Amino acid sequence: MDTAARLAEDLRERAGAALSGGGAEPVIGLVEGNGGIGPYGTLMRAFQEAMAAQGLELRIGELGDVRTRPDGKLTLGGAPLDLVLRNFGARQLLDDPAGPEAAEHLFRAHEAGRTVLYTSLESGLYAHKNALALLSDPRWATTFDAVERDLVDRVLPWSRTLDRTASPDLLDVCRERREHLILKPGAGHGGLGTFVGWECDDDAWREALAIAVDHGYLAQERVVPRPEPVLDPVTGVVDHRVAAVGVFLTSRGYAGAHARVNRADAGAIVGMSANPDTRMACVFSHP
């Protein structure tokens, strides 16, 4: 599966209605929040190279670099943009005094059909982990049909939102089941701010639950991973690793996968920000 090729197909299709000057290929803008290119520029340039290999021109910039022509079309470095890939989130906009006004130009250009915005800010709702509690909580079971309910029960671990409205019974359950639970910030990433119950003692867990309630964390049932044997081709030694697989999807469906990998004894969190032993790996598939 060629993920870059699948994404390029999707970008061409989405940008089609906004193509400027009858051009055969769209010009894409990969736009960060102001000051965001510094920490993420290397990754953005790697993506730029991947799209160039697919025949797409992708320009990199920050919100403050984007301009609006009189006809409503966005430009970056003087080039008209047919589609913008948003590489900034709502929090970046709110933390930047100039952010909301700068982003408004993107939204207006999208509404006018002059430059397509590939993903809206609302799409961030699906990345918030507390959405999983809406699927898991039996109070909302009647929202789903039988097939959907069966899917949730098979795939999703027990998940609940902890906040100041959490019932005493729910908090009691979380205190008693420390060794079977993990607490995650809903809008977090990379394992940062996560509390692993089976790696805490009772006092640390009590403090973690207080933080979770104050900040609206997600409490989730532990999933015990299946370690995979991995051969070191240099030493010939086989040890065991745990992989967290991420799946890429476009409007056409499955578009490949990647994996983050830790040694099986390196702790519960498989994330590069929280665990320096984490490594990235590609995923090979076969029929």
Image (cartoon, helix red, strand yellow):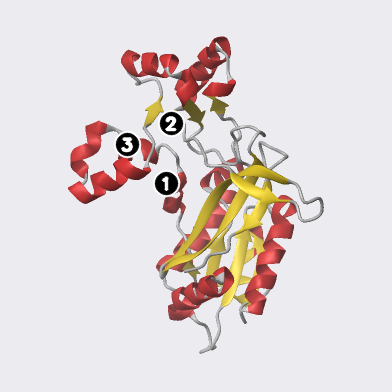
Q: Earlier in the sequence, mark 1 or mark 3?
A: 1
Of residues 121 and 249, the one drawn nearer to the viewer in this rendering: 249
The residue wearing badge 1 is 125
| Label 3 crowd (10 A; few <14 / some 14-19 / many >=20) | some
Amino acid type for the residue under numbered disc 2: Gln
Q: Position of residue 132 (x, y in %)?
A: 38, 40
The residue wearing badge 3 is 136
| Label 1 crowd (10 A; few <14 / some 14-19 / many >=20) | few
Amino acid type for the residue under numbered disc 1: Leu
Q: Is residue 97 visible?
A: no
Report helix, strand or loop for mark 3: helix
Q: Earlier in the sequence, mark 1 or mark 2?
A: 1
Q: Quadrant of residue 142?
A: top left
Amino acid type for the residue under numbered disc 3: Ser
Q: Position of residue 223 (x, y in %)?
A: 47, 35
Determine the residue positioned at 29% across, 33% down. 137
Q: Nearer the viewer, mark 1 or mark 2?
A: 2
As displayed, is residue 161 above or below residue 174? below
Judge left or right: residue 266 versus residue 28. right
Task: Measure the C-alpha gap from mark 2 to mark 3.
Answer: 10 Å
Q: Quadrant of residue 254?
A: bottom left
